[in-house]
Amino acid sequence: MADNFKVADLGLAEEGRLRIEWAESRMPVLMALREKAKKELPLRGMRVAGCLHVTKETAVLIRTIRAAGAEVSWSGCNPLSTNDSTAAALAAEGTSIYAWHGLSTEEFYWCIDRTLDFKPTLTLDDGADLIFTVHAKRPDLWADVIGGTEETTTGVKRLRAMADDGKLQYPVIAVNDSATKWDFDNVHGTGQSSLDGILRATSVLIAGKVFVVAGFGHCGRGVAMRARGLGGRVIVTEIDPVAALRATLEGFDVMTMEQAAKVGDIFITATGMRDILIGKHFASMKDGAVICNTGHYDCEISIPELEALATSWREIRPNNEEFRLKDGRRIYLLARGRLVNLAAAEGHPSEVMDMSFANQFSALCLLAKEGRNMGKQVYVLPPEQDQMVAGLKLQTMGIAIDKLTDAQIAYSNDYSAGT
Ligand code: ADE
C-alpha cells in the first residue's frame, strides 16, 4: 500500500475519518447518488485522476467515485489547501493520494505527475493544472483519456481558450457552469468561507470596518453580501461597467482601487486577474490594513512588491504575516495571498459542496458513458441535471414547492393570449 500515496502523517487518519463522517452527514444529495451508484456501478473500469482541494467534502466525492466502481488517484490543487488529516484518512482506506499542506511548487507538480503515472481514463480538475500537465507533458496518455471535468471559473476560461485554439485533446465538462454549482458554491460558499478564513486568521470585528471587495462576480458578490451582513461598510471595485452598476444598485459603494486603498481596513481580491493589489496601493493603505485573496491563483496580490516596500516582517498569528513599511505602517497579509477560505479555514461548507460534487460525480458518469462520442470541446451539463440536483436538495431540506397545473402549462404555451 505504502507506495501508492504520500501524505504528511498517516497517524492523523482517525481525526480525518471523523471529519469526513461529519461532512457525509451534511451532503445528502451526493450520498443519495452514492447509494444508487453502489448498485449500478456507472464508473466500473474507470481510472479517475483528480486534482482538487483535499478537504473533507472532497473525500466524500472520492469515496463516491470509488463506490461507483472506479479506481482513484488524487492530488491537491493548491499548495496550502490540503487538510492533512483528510489526506491521511483517504490514504489509510486505500486511495492513491499525493497531497500534504505546504507543498513547494516542485512538489505540487511531482504529486500531479504521480497521479498521471496511474494512466487515467478520466481527469477531474479545479483550476486545470492536471489537464494542462496531460496536454503539455503526457501525449502518451491522450488516446486513453475519455474526458475531463473542471470545477472552477478560472479553469473553465482557460480550457475554453484552449478549445478555441483547437488544442484540447478530449472533451471536458465545465461543472462550474451549472446553475446548481455557481449560484450556490460561488456565491454562498465563497461568501461564508472567505469571511471564515479572515476571522480565523485575524479574529477582528467586521462591524464598522471598511471592507473592500475587488471583483463583483459571483464570488465577490457572495463575499460582499456576507461582509455587509456582519456590519462591514463594504466597497466594491470593478472593471466591468455592468457588474459595477449591479453592485451600486445592490447598495455597495463602488470606486477605483486607488481610491479604496486609502480608506479600506480589510481588502479581499476575488477577480481571477493578476496585480489587483500592487505597490502603489500598499503605499497608500492605512496602518493595520489586512489584505487577502479568495481567487484561485495567488497572483492577485503582488507579494514581491509588498516585500520590496517592507523593512521588517514577522508571522504574528497563523496565516497572518505583518509587513512593516519604512514609515512604520503595518500591512497584514493573510494565507500568503492564496485562497484565504481554504488556506486559513476549511473551504466552502459541506452543504454547498454537496451540490457542486453531485454535479462533478454526474459529469464523470456522463463522460464514462458518452465521452467517446463527444467532440474535443468544453460542454456544460444538461439543464435536467440542475433540476435533479436542486429537486433532491430541496427534498432533503424538507421543502416542498408548487407544480404548474395543466391550465397553467397551456397558458404558458399559448402565444395568442394578450391583455
Ligand atoms: N473549493 C472551495 N471549498 C471547497 C471544499 N470545501 N472542498 C473542495 N473544494 C472546495
Image (spheres, rainbow, N blue to C red):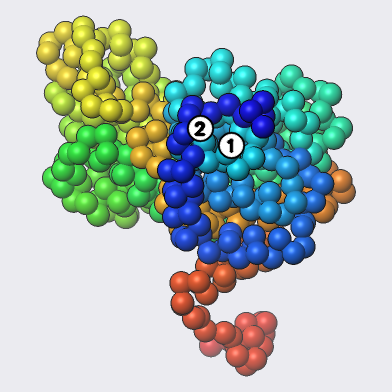
**Does any portion of residue 255 appear in the rendered image?**
no
What is the secondary structure assignment of the residue under circle 2?
helix
Which quadrant holds residue 316? top left
Q: CB under 8 Å between callouts 2 and 1?
A: yes
In terms of depth relative to the viewer, which is nearer, 67 or 273? 67
Q: Disc 2 residue type?
A: Leu
Tell me residue 107's x, y (percent): 56, 18
User: Residue drawn 40% across and 42% down?
Assistant: 346
Q: Which residue is mark 2?
A: 10
- Quadrant of the image for the N terminus? top right
What is the secondary structure assignment of the residue under circle 1?
helix
Tell me residue 219's x, y (percent): 43, 45
User: Residue drawn 30% across and 51% down?
Assistant: 226
393 shown above or below 274 = below
Q: Disc 1 residue type?
A: Ala
User: Residue drawn 20% across and 28% down?
Assistant: 289
Give the Cα separation between the discs numbered 2 and 1: 8 Å
Task: Please indicate whether residue 198 sits to the left or right of residue 121 in the image.
Answer: left
**Does any portion of residue 308 appear in the rendered image?**
yes
Q: Which residue is mark 1?
A: 91
Density class for disc 1 (Cα within 10 Å; few <14, some 14-19, many ≥20) is many
In terms of depth relative to the viewer, which is nearer, 169 or 277? 169
What residue occupies the far bottom of the structure in this picture? 407
224 shown above or below 342 = below
Tell me residue 370's x, y (percent): 83, 52
Tell me residue 44's x, y (percent): 80, 51
33 shown above or below 366 = below
In terms of depth relative to the viewer, which is nearer, 59 or 336? 59
